[in-house]
Image: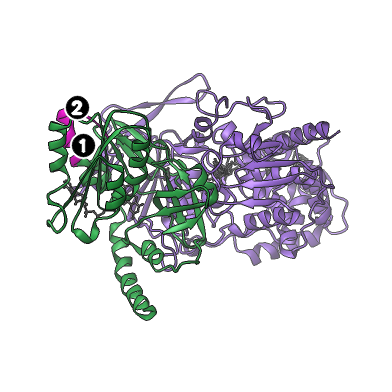
Amino acid sequence: MHDRSTLDAQAKTYLASLEGKELKNKERAAIPSQDMPSQDAGKRIRNMEEVAQGYTEAQARLESMRCLQCRTAPCIKGCPVAIDIPRFIKHAENGDFAASLAVIKESSLLPAICGRVCPQETQCQETCTLGKMHKDVSKAVSIGRIERYVADLEMERGEAVMPEAAPSTGKKVAVVGSGPAGITAAADLRKAGHEVTLLEAFHKPGGVLVYGIPEFRLPKAIVEQEINNLKKMGVALKTNFLVGRTRKLRDLIEEDGYDAVFIGSGAGLPKFMHIEGENLVGVLSANEYLTRSNLMKAYDEENADTPIIRSKVVAVLGGGNVAMDAARTAVRLGAAKVYIVYRRTEKEMPARVEEVAHAKEEGVEFLLLQSPKRILGDEKQHVRAMEVLSYRLGEPDDSGRRRPVVIEGSEREIPVDTVIVSIGNDSNPLLEKTTDGLLVNKWGNIIINEEDCSTSIDRVYAGGDIVLGAATVILAMGQGRKAAESINARLAREHD
Amino acid sequence: MTIEAPLIAKERRPGQFVILQLDTDYGERVPLTIADADAEKGTITLIFQTVGNSTHRMAVKEPGESIENVLGPLGQPTHIEKFGRVLCVGGGIGTAPLHPIAQGMARAGNELKIIIGARNKELVILEQEMGALADELIVCTDDGSRGRKALVTEPLKELCESWKPDLVVAVGPPIMMKFCAETTRPFGIKTMVSLNTIMVDGTGMCGGCRVTVGGETKFVCVDGPEFDGHLVDFDNMMLRLGTYRAREEDDHHTCHLDLQLEEEHNA
Ligand SMILES: Cc1cc2nc3c(=O)[nH]c(=O)nc-3n(C[C@H](O)[C@H](O)[C@H](O)COP(=O)(O)OP(=O)(O)OC[C@H]3O[C@@H](n4cnc5c(N)ncnc54)[C@H](O)[C@@H]3O)c2cc1C
Ligand SMILES: Cc1cc2nc3c(=O)[nH]c(=O)nc-3n(C[C@H](O)[C@H](O)[C@H](O)COP(=O)(O)OP(=O)(O)OC[C@H]3O[C@@H](n4cnc5c(N)ncnc54)[C@H](O)[C@@H]3O)c2cc1C
Ligand code: SF4
Ligand code: SF4
Ligand code: FES
């Protein structure tokens, strides 16, 4: 049941029955968890608009009433940036949404985004007492949805309170990359009064938020608004600027006079499986597919110059958020059949539970405990089929996960015309290759001092996916914050 | 086409390219090699062939107009040093990206010979510039309308026998580079080629530009564009270049008419 007006009416009725009552924990726990209003699956597969439409006011308040205001607040420990969750929810329960948002903003800069894309079920909501009581994490307080509601409200009213920048310090800081790590660092550095320049390789800022995560999950207008807020604060933005090529990292400090640099350049280099047939026409990385569709707007065939492959039967390899996004994009681009092919079971899938559910509703078929052996081509070397092998779960490995073991002789062919590879990224080697003395680990991730995000080069700090490997928006944001704090402290010392 | 891009003009080295985009919302990202640059004036020169929608729109730009986005310089610069005898081979528009490489090779003190090939005399470019750099310049056309009537591989083979170059650099259409590499292989002469695959970001993020070199997957935009021609899987590269061909041809069809009308109108 996801129709917005029905859900709203139900919430209002329930809310009215509680009005004026002093609620006991038992009564709070008895309030039904509020479903997210969303576009009907049959309709949304024909558009790019956001699937989850957001709570109504009554729903947001009612959901907030479910929170038990636990003294120990285990939810806070689940949030990577330790938002004071019970406090923001209390304000929301009382209908004081501005105060609620102010509490969130003490710790997180991008609540409209995190409320949408955080894997809540493994973070704040995993540890929630209410979920534990119901023995079902999906019955936990919907912290992310409430967070999204209060953040959207501010955006809708267009009354974003811009943090004031402190008086100029005369110091210059460059921020490399405009994903969540870069956006957050830029805002916090600017607040401290430094002159901040955001350098972005692409023609549009936002990082994965614009080129990776599709419109139907995170509207680009939200990211744009965050970038505009930065500009209003006085952050300068230079697009089409690839640090390492357009300018060397060291030159930013040695020649251009930046006092510090923050690197938030994200992941890069999609991984391939190295199996037979991987270079046939019709095999591509999820990054390429999503970039064409999102950033280059190839889904809009009328207007966009960039082409995208139009497929009938698609196999997406992998089980993460990226795989779900690619599969659901393929559905929207008109594929008649889309498979997710994953080596383990649904329980092990790293994707957000909500995205998996949405993908299923949209008709994506999950081929679990299966993995491709090779990809087969036709006489023109175009993909015609994929041969998969079945697996079963064997003994747990060192990490405690049960290792998939191949079932010999289980080969079978599934006819497909497109294979989208989504099995993760290696790190982008560009900065390391073009910068003497920038130390990286064996996976190519920049090595930092965990305490202050400093790298092996003086005045250079780093955070986000380039340090963590593929991580999450909130973790990238958290590191951007931490790095900005250390840069601010250091520049303040030098200022005196 | 010469455009103002001071930072790129200053940083660029032979062998590198840029990515242009004519419209931030809907434009396609088009990679083009930097044919020449003037660091003092802050300009770069690009020479291109009008093949699809974007290059057509670029071709009708007037002096003084601007291009929305230019990113670069991208790719690894050519490895230039004194090799001894260097033979540069340019095919068609590939002669343009070859020019800065030839310049660099001459400057590094190499003995330099150049072969340029084109379908006919109208398509021979940079003949004078190349002539000025080389100890010997051989021009050939498929139809014999200029220079020798031959494919570039003919004089290439002869020079491999008689002059015995230490290095061959071949830039042009994939099929030409493939046959150049096949020509030099029996002589064991190292042959560098410059690949122009499909690209989106040009920064190593999408994997669209991948090619197989010596059995390994390489990304042309960050690992290249130059590779050892004897190791490149040209057949697969040509195949993948055709991925979006049907759609491009469609576009080209309508757009060509539109633009012809526009050109007539402007004339
Ligand atoms: C399809 C997809 C779906 C995802 N879904 C989720 C989700 O649901 N929830 C979640 O929490 N996380 C999700 N993630 C992961 C999340 O998006 C990333 O962890 C996060 O964006 C990392 O942020 P970042 O700032 O480190 O880098 P990015 O967002 O990658 O931004 C880096 C930016 O730096 C630019 N850049 C790179 N190199 C240079 C250079 N040399 N010079 C200048 N600029 C440069 C890039 O162009 C890019 O814009 C998803 C990722 C993808 C790809
Ligand atoms: C590194 C690189 C950079 C590039 N940069 C640019 C750029 O800056 N701008 C741009 O517009 N395009 C660029 N391109 C695109 C590309 O050069 C052209 O699309 C391509 O050269 C087609 O040109 P053409 O039609 O004139 O060639 P054709 O006329 O088809 O061929 C040119 C010559 O190649 C030789 N040749 C052809 N076929 C064979 C064969 N089977 N065996 C032996 N020799 C053969 C012949 O001598 C012929 O005369 C670049 C390409 C590369 C490789
Ligand atoms: S930022 Fe993410 S993890 Fe933290 S409270 Fe919000 S949704 Fe939960
Ligand atoms: S753990 Fe759950 S119920 Fe307890 S304070 Fe946090 S959100 Fe509320
Ligand atoms: S063009 Fe995208 S990785 Fe090379």
Chain A visual colour: purple
Chain designation of label 2: B
Left or right for A347, reference B36: right
Measured from the top left, where is residue A289 in percent x and y? 42, 50
> Label 2 belongs to which residue?
B188
Q: Residues within 10 Å of mark 1 (few under 14, many from 20)?
A: many
Earlier-in-chain disc, 2 versus 1: 1
* Label number found at residue B181: 1
| Numbered range of the magenta stretch | B179-191
- The reply to whether residue A137 is in sight is no
Hey, which residue is sitting farthest bottom in the picture? B265
- Give the prevailing secondary structure in the magenta stretch: helix
For the point 63% across and 57% down, which residue is it? A224
Chain B visual colour: green
Q: Are marks 2 and 1 on the same chain?
A: yes
Q: Pick the quarter of the image with the C terminus of chain B.
A: bottom left
Q: Pick the quarter of the image with the N terminus of chain B.
A: bottom left
